């Protein structure tokens, strides 16, 4: 075991040395900068463009994309950017116009164009109709912005990225096309894998703190029960409603997200004698992450 570890270290170190000693003739330094809002989008751009562009993320890892406030250094970096791939998440509403002011030459692409959004699913959607009508905290019109958790919708976003990259950097069309086709092929395979993983499940209902997984649930015919109510922690009454539902549905796992508080997820888990499993929709390696999430859900829903 110890020997293996030493070998691994030596291999890692030689990889590091190899990387740092390679002279940078072309590549990152010279590559045009494009901005994206969230980390998975950086992965999409990198899959299509490799190191022919330098993809930078606005919402830094660990931060909440609904309420993010860009840093002055990020605003400054925008002035060198060729393009901004927007994903229509809340913070963009307030900032996109300012980004355009910071760099009027920057092309802003809405990668969600053509995606039909669903209404945001809130916890109170399982209350009965009368109670539901009385609820004033709930914004009926809010649409679910988490469009990157559905492979089908990511194909649409990747298509927009591909189209505009080809338009902006036509000299790299051949590489972009090859990479894009490979990526789409892997997304097709991912969809098949996820469907396969969910074939044997005994329940299709899962509980999650922040309602990030609505489009994933919609694509794979699952039923998401969110804990969070309109972006806030649930009240004691709302909590006990979810606890009752979890007991009725024989649910023993509560999914939570590392970017948000896990307090109420833990409270529910304690009450149902279950456990909290962390899943993030914001991991860099989107493909691998979705595979793991599907695997974890398949296990949980088969218990
Ligand atoms: Zn979210």
Image (cartoon, grey):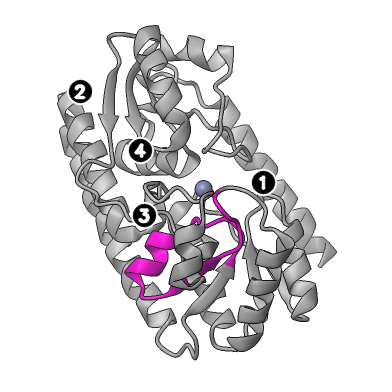
* Comes first in the chain, label 1 or label 3: 1
Specify few, some or many for label 4: CA neighbours under 10 Å numbering under 14, 14-19, or 20 or more: many
Query: Disc 2 and disc 1: Cα gap in Å?
Result: 37 Å
Point out the frontmost of discs 2 and 1: 2
CB contact under 8 Å: marks 4 and 1: no
CB contact under 8 Å: marks 2 and 1: no
* Comes first in the chain, label 3 or label 4: 4
Determine whether, in the image, residue 212 is placed left or right of residue 104. Answer: right
Residue 68 image offset from top left, x and y in percent: 56, 30
Point out the frontmost of discs 2 and 3: 3
Span of residues in magenta: 208-230
Question: Which residue was labeled with disc 1?
Answer: 12
Query: Disc 3 and disc 4: Cα gap in Å?
Result: 27 Å
Question: Which residue was labeled with disc 4?
Answer: 45
Query: Disc 4 and disc 1: Cα gap in Å?
Result: 26 Å
User: How many numbered marks does the figure carry?
Assistant: 4
């Amino acid at each position: 075991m110890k020997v293996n570890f030493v070998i691994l270290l030596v291999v890692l170190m030689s990889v590091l040395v190899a990387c740092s000693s390679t002279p940078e003739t072309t590549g990152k330094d010279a590559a045009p900068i494009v901005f994206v809002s969230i980390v998975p989008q950086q992965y999409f751009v990198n899959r299509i463009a490799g190191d022919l562009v330098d993809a930078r993320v606005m919402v830094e890892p660990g931060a909440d994309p609904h309420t993010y406030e860009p840093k002055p250094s990020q605003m400054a970096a925008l002035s060198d950017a060729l393009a901004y791939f927007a994903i229509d998440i809340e913070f963009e509403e307030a900032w996109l116009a300012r980004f355009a002011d910071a760099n009027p030459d920057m092309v802003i692409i809405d990668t969600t164009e053509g995606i039909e959004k669903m209404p945001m699913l809130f916890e109170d959607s399982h209350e009965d109709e009368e109670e539901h009508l009385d609820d004033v905290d709930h914004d009926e019109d809010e649409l679910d912005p988490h469009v990157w958790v559905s492979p089908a919708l990511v194909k649409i976003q990747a298509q927009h990225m591909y189209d505009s990259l080809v338009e902006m950097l036509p000299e790299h069309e051949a590489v972009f096309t090859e990479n894009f086709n490979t990526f789409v092929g892997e997304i097709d395979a991912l969809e098949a894998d996820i469907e396969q993983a969910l074939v044997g499940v005994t329940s299709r209902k899962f509980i999650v703190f922040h309602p990030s997984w609505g489009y994933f649930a919609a694509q794979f015919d699952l039923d998401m029960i969110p804990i969070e109510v309109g972006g806030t922690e649930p009240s004691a009454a709302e909590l006990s409603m979810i606890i009752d539902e979890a007991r009725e549905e024989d649910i023993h796992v509560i999914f939570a997200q590392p970017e948000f508080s896990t307090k109420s997820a833990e409270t529910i888990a304690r009450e149902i004698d279950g456990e909290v499993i962390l899943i993030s929709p914001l991991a860099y390696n989107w493909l691998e992450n979705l595979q793991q999430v599907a695997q974890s859900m398949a296990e949980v829903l088969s218990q």
